[in-house]
């Protein structure tokens, strides 16, 4: 009986961590795309104001920190 329970718990634990890693990778890719789009937009439109362009890029890069995305990524996307 306990071997079946242990096997089920092991499968659940493995599924949990694989889902966690998959979401972390996808959120990192989304964050990198957000930085790229922000950088291209700021280069194309904010030619006279380098400070504002730097602020926009820095704010977009704050979104890509792995710790914030892995724990609060769903909250950021939903909110």
Image (spheres, helix red, strand yellow):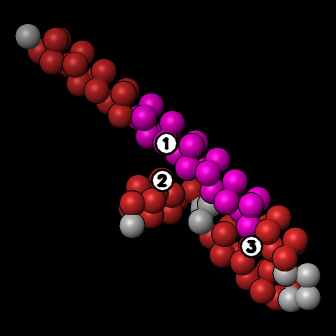
Secondary structure under the numbered disc 3 in the rendered image: helix
- The residue pinned by badge 3 equals 57
Which residue corresponds to the image point at 22% horizontal and 19% vertical from the top-left? 8
Q: Which mark is residue 63?
A: none
Counting residues from the N terminus, which is met first, the one under dot 3 or under dot 2?
3
- Mark 1 Cα shell of 10 Å, populated few (<14), some (14-19), many (≥20): some
Kindly check if marks 1 and 2 are in contact, taking CB atoms under 8 A apart as contact: yes
Q: Is residue 21 magenta?
A: yes
Q: Which mark is residue 23?
A: 1
- Mark 2 Cα shell of 10 Å, populated few (<14), some (14-19), many (≥20): some
**In what quadrant of the picture does the C terminus appear?**
bottom left
Compared to residue 36, the image places residue 6 above or below, namely above
- The residue pinned by badge 2 equals 70
67 displayed left or right of 8: right
Q: CA distance from mark 3 to mark 1?
A: 24 Å
How many numbered marks, from 0 up? 3
Which residue corresponds to the image point at 58% horizontal and 42% vertical from the top-left? 25
In the image, the segment drawn in magenta is: 17-38
């Amino acid at each position: 009986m306990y071997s079946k329970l242990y096997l089920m718990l092991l499968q659940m634990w493995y599924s949990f961590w694989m889902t966690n890693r998959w979401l972390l990778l996808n959120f990192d890719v989304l964050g990198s795309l957000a930085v790229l789009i922000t950088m291209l937009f700021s280069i194309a439109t904010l030619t006279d104001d380098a400070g504002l362009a730097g602020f926009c890029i820095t704010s977009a890069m704050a979104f890509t920190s792995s710790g914030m995305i892995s724990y609060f990524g769903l909250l950021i996307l939903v909110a």
